[in-house]
Image (spheres, helix red, strand yellow):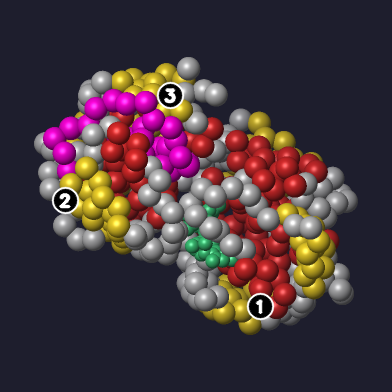
Amino acid sequence: MQKFVITGGNRLGGEIELQGCKNSALPIMAAAVLVQGKCILESCPNLTDVYSAARIINSLGCKCSVAGKIAEIDASAVSGSAIPEKLMGEMRSSIMFVGAILGRTGQCTFSIPGGCELGPRPIDMHLAAFSKLGAEISENGGEITCRLPKGRGHGSKISLSFPSVGATENIILCSVLAEGETVVNNAAREPEICDMCRFLRACGAKIKGDGESRIVIEGVEKLHGCEYCIMPDRIAGATYLAMTAAAGGAMILKNACIAEMEPFISVLEQTGCYICTADNRIYLRRGGRLKAIRDRIRTMPHPGFPTDAQAVLMAALAAADGTSVFEENIFDCRYRHTDALIKMGADIQVMGKAAVIRGVKGLHGADVEATDLRGGAAMAVAALGAEGTTSIGCINHIDRGYEKFEDNITSLGGRISRV
Ligand code: UD1
């Protein structure tokens, strides 16, 4: 198993180009299964999760190749409707393929996506929505089959009890080829959902209201291929900004999605970092010590503070002046990175949903293990600001979501190697 070895203590400086977004690349790849034609995706990040998605697409008899930043998907000849159990277990986002396969072929067999990274992540809302769209659902020994008796779903009104990102995406995927109109109330408003809808519209889908809490989908008979450029990754962007905030110095993030990153930037600014945005660039400079954030940082659905940026900001605040408090409202078990930060000298107390971070003078290196994708990235943020050397194990978690992680850190002047 590979590790990252990071020696902290020096200021960062330089510029990096932001990668394409993992959380929209995956649903867009799933959406391409709905299309009778070839789709070319630009700015597709090179990540293990993207390769897993490609394997799912190929297992369905479709063609998917990823080379450089381009993914080519041709689902003209889809022949399968089952997601192999092994692929289902590799990545939780495999659930996104269910709506697409069901919408395209009228049936999908799959197993529960495995793992317990952030606490229980049920799929009840996804299944209830498929059922409203006309699917019959059966379970046999852990294998679930959704089947549309008429081969095609029918439009429906669906009100989500919570604005789930994945459920919103799956409803859209399952309804773009359904008969009639589907309305999603209390839909999630994350920018990645809008990115997937822009892609689907470019293929001929009729979707309105994405980015708002009421989305209307009018089913069409068929979708056609297109060329589409995936949006930049706001969470990877937040991670690199947090690194410079933790280590000090100045950086420019190029190809940034500024409006989508605003909920993170507006909080990060309160640490005393100077942040300036223009065109699609973000400049960040940290001169003196970081300041704690006075107001509780509450993770909320977009446009609230993103849960995916909670860990990386916490890592920077661990060595700020004063006390910051987080409130995690999206996932039950999203403080697993705190033990590693404590091992590096942080003073963090977790009490249910809340985590109290009393800023210390400085962190020190330690041997730690990535607990999950963003938690692992948070350890790298802390390591860059810490004195001494940190070894981070289980970096397969980090490789799921960050493209050229060590190259980007090296080009900012950070000392990191993969061993
Ligand atoms: C997506 C993101 C993930 C991000 C999360 C919240 C992708 C690939 N992943 O995950 O990075 O952290 O949004 O912004 O885009 N829930 C249920 N039942 C369901 C579905 C969800 O109870 O059927 C709960 C979840 O357990 C969680 C909450 O709803 O507590 C939000 O989950 P959801 O928005 O669905 O997250 P994901 O789509 O899994």
Task: Give the CA separation, mark 3 to mark 2.
Answer: 29 Å
- Amino acid at pointer 2: Thr
Q: Residue at x 40, y 37 (%)?
A: 377
Mark 1 residue crowding within 10 angstroms, few (<14) / some (14–19) / many (20+)? many
Residue 296 position within the rendered picture, expressed as x and y whole percent measured from the top left: 23, 61
Q: Is residue 317 magenta?
A: no
Residue 187 position within the rendered picture, expressed as x and y whole percent measured from the top left: 52, 72
Mark 1 C-beta closer than 8 Å to ligand 1: no
- Residue 168 visible in the shown view: yes
| Pointers 2 and 1 in contact (C-beta within 8 Å) | no
Q: Nearer the viewer, residue 101 or 283?
A: 101
The residue most toward the bottom is 157
* Residue identifier under label 2: 323
- Amino acid at pointer 1: Thr
Q: Earlier in the sequence, mark 3 or mark 2?
A: 3
The magenta span reads 359-382
Q: Earlier in the sequence, mark 3 or mark 1?
A: 3
Q: Residue 4, which numbered label?
A: 3
Q: Nearer the viewer, residue 20 or 278?
A: 20
Residue 59 position within the rendered picture, expressed as x and y whole percent measured from the top left: 80, 43
Q: Quadrant of residue 239?
A: top left
Above or below: residue 3 compared with residue 35: above
Q: Residue 2, which numbered label?
A: none
Q: Is residue 154 left or right of residue 287?
A: right
Above or below: residue 329 compared with residue 385: below
Task: Give the CA separation, mark 2 to mark 1.
Answer: 46 Å
Q: Residue at x 62, y 68 (%)?
A: 124
Q: Is residue 380 magenta?
A: yes
Residue 99 position within the rendered picture, expressed as x and y whole percent measured from the top left: 70, 62
Q: Residue at x 20, y 52 (%)?
A: 324
* Residue identifier under label 1: 182
